[in-house]
Amino acid sequence: MSTKDKTMEKIVSLCKRRGFIYPSSEIYGGLNSCYDYGPLGSELKRSVKDFWWKSMTQTHTDIHGLDSAILMAPRIWEASGHLENFTDPLVDCKNCKSRFRQDHLNGATACPKCQGELTEARQFNLMFKTFMGPLEDAANTVYLRPETAQGIYVNYQNVMTTARAKLPFGIAQIGKAFRNEITPGNFTFRTREFEQMEMQYFVKPGEDDASMDRWKEIRRNWYDKLMINSEKLRFHEHQGNELAHYAKAAYDIEYEFPFGWSELEGVHNRTDFDLSRHQEYSGKNLQYFEESTKEKFIPYIIETSAGCDRSILCILCDAYSEEEERVVLRFAPFIAPVQVAILPLVKKDGLPDIMDNIANKLKKHYRVAKDVSGSIGKRYRRQDEIGTPFCITIDYESKDDNTVTIRHRDSMQQERISIDAIESYIEPALALPID
Ligand code: ATP
């Protein structure tokens, strides 16, 4: 096994052991490529979504939030092109029966596992189908949305009217999407049920190129704020065949995962394709009327489409660090699932009461854990392994002079500070970096 595979294996095992991510339906043997986020994972995911949401709607007063339904009118998927084109080319090995996406075979014509003969490629639609109501027939077929974006496009006029928005403006949405992927894998990187964080920015045609440049930069900076190693981030520009037929320009933000460079997020110039198609298929006029020039036109859309689960996986891989005597998750402190751990040296003599008093104060603003068992060294290691940026240790001196020791996860340095100064001490590191 290569070192990179081993790293991935260690991260998966830590995620399970410490309660970040479990295999789904585990007591029934699991369900292929489905995962559940445990106590620490769900806190981490919430923090990342909260950071994304606030980076969009709170930072930009021209971006409005939306939470649209997963089930939508089936005609939407005709208009969007998903019914016709949302397919992957599927090939099977006639010998070992392995299944591949032909476009992932890098031109190979034999099975990469056993060199067996491959079948002709068949186009396989990735949308999950289900039925609405008791009759399971074509007329009642509905789809689980394969992207959250269409919910935004079909609400563009609702949002514009109710928010009294004028171009340019954006609509942001976080939600589940479903794709019946042929080859899910690499832990949570490619799954069949996942969460997207999408923002669609509506602009006047002609202003799209500048808007695209702006959003590329904003979205790249977002990962910097999460303290992702910038040498492991890059843009990949879609060229030729890669570029979707409706896109004028498309860039992926990629991260170097232990299994290689892979897409985290797409930033796309989708032109007026989506709204024009919805205008055509719905029969509703979706043109924008610009009062100052009396012009009518269909806006262009710049899309920023990030995978929440892929962001989490990137954060975990980037934070994971093995050091001489410890494993540390070096999360950006503001997203750490536990931000402050409070550790009394002993379980008696009033030290746990001091712990409770500090915890009661801090928990109003921060994610706090209390840990009273095991040696202090062991407790530090436990907190390092889940990425807790600050540990506060209470000892006998604390009773006399109202001070505690505060330990930094990354440097392991310790300082003595007054209990009354804890909040102002940790606040700068834990504040959300939104501007
Ligand atoms: P890929 O080429 O990896 O299949 P895509 O180009 O089809 O991805 P988009 O349709 O642009 O992806 O989706 C936007 C984002 O949604 C992706 O950048 C990714 O973060 C996330 N995403 C897409 N498919 C999956 C999946 N199967 N599992 C987890 N996240 C996904």
Image (cartoon, rainbow, N blue to C red):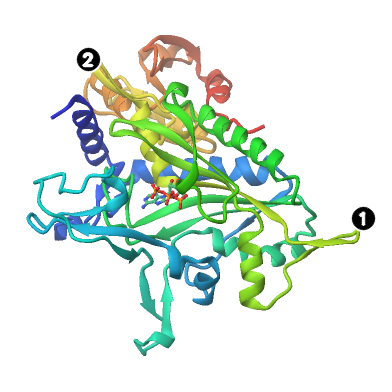
Query: Closer to the camera, 327 or 31?
Result: 31
Quarter occupied by residue 145: bottom left
Locate residue 132, reporting x and y percent: 42, 82
Q: Residue at x 40, y 9 (%)?
A: 413
Q: In the image, is 336 to the left or to the right of 365?
A: left
Locate residue 396, reporting x and y percent: 36, 14
State whether residue 142 appears in this view: yes
Quadrant (top left/top right/bottom left/bottom right) for the C terminus: top right
**Pointers 1 and 2 in contact (C-beta within 8 Å):** no
Query: Closer to the camera, 412 or 201?
Result: 201
Identify the residue position indicated by label 2 in the image: 325
Disc 1 is placed on an element classified as: loop
Quarter occupied by residue 137: bottom left
Locate residue 62, reporting x and y percent: 73, 48
Identify the residue position indicated by label 1 in the image: 292
Please state which amino acid type lies under the numbered disc 1.
Answer: Ser
Disc 2 is placed on an element classified as: loop
